Amino acid sequence: MRAICILLTTIVVLGCGDEQATDALMTLASPEEIAQIRNGSNDRVRRGVVGLAMLTGGGSGACTGSLIAENVVLTARHCIARLNNADRGVRCRSTTAGSAYSPNQVYVTLEPALTQSPRDYVGVEEIVTPTDPLLCNTDIALLKLDRRIRPEEMPLLVPRVDRGVRTNEVFTIIGYGGTDDRGSGSGQRRIRYDISVTCSEGQCPRYAALDREWGGGGGVCRGDSGGPAIDQQGRVIGVASRGGQMCSSSIYSS
């Protein structure tokens, strides 16, 4: 039953201090070393999906996000905050999120791969997270960028707010993740179509998800955390939170 509760953040230990954050971007994997959404294909279309690099005193993390306003990125809370009681996977009754990292520890790229050049990254000015410490139902965060992204740089993704997901609804996943549970080589933006909703909000097993979360088929892996589930009209219907072993299933924040 724990198979569906693995976090999807990729961590690469760099041993850098916060003051080295910009220089540490140079140590991220090159495009030749990176992998992808499992069974996906390269995605070089600028469609509002961005990559995240989190640089802390303990190393570096890679995640995904959606540009939903000219200076706002939607992502997963666990990408930008330390977790408690998550060593063996997320437990909805006990896994909690701590305070968010400092904004100067988080960087966003519009590029189709996490490059080694600091010039390819945009800084973060502010991070907003839910107040409830429990991670389940609150694995979502907003990043306010330190500059506006022009329409010609990257189009926006619009969240769907008029209705929830339906079981068997088909969606698309996009992310910068790896191809296995270890997140081997994450960093290339990939896309995979025709994933199905397996359980809608409030209908998933309680050990796996709560009432503001829903489940989907496989494909998302470590590094895809925070990435969007996109409906057939191109709208965001969920934020990738956690998944099953061998990238076999997924839970999304609604």
Image (cartoon, rainbow, N blue to C red):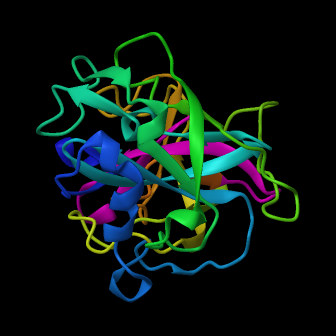
> Residue 79 appears at what percent x and percent y?
39, 41
Residue at the far bottom in the pictured view: 32
> Looking at this view, is 41 or 162 the one in front?
41
Horizontal side of residue 12 vs 42, given as left or right? left
On the picture, is 39 further left or further right than 24?
A: right
Quarter of the figure with residue 209: top left
Q: Give coordinates of residue 213: x percent, y percent.
A: 50, 32
Q: Position of residue 127 (x, y in %)?
A: 54, 27
Q: Residue at x 57, y 45 (%)?
A: 123
Q: Where residue 196 sits: x, y (%)?
A: 56, 58
Q: Quadrant of the C terminus?
A: top right
Q: Quadrant of the N terminus?
A: top left
- When the figure is inspected, residue 107 is found, relative to residue 37, above or below; the finding is above
225 is within the stretch colored magenta: no
**Residue name at image x 58 percent, y 72 percent:** 191
Mark yes or no: residue 1 visible: no
To which quarter of the image does residue 24 belong? Answer: bottom left
- Tell me the magenta residue range: 230-254
Is residue 34 visible in the rendered image? The answer is yes
Return the residue nearer the eye: 153 or 40: 153
Quarter of the image for residue 53 reads bottom left
Q: Main secondary structure of the magenta part?
A: strand
x 58%, y 65%: residue = 119
Q: Residue at x 57, y 50 (%)?
A: 65
Residue reaching furthest right? Answer: 151
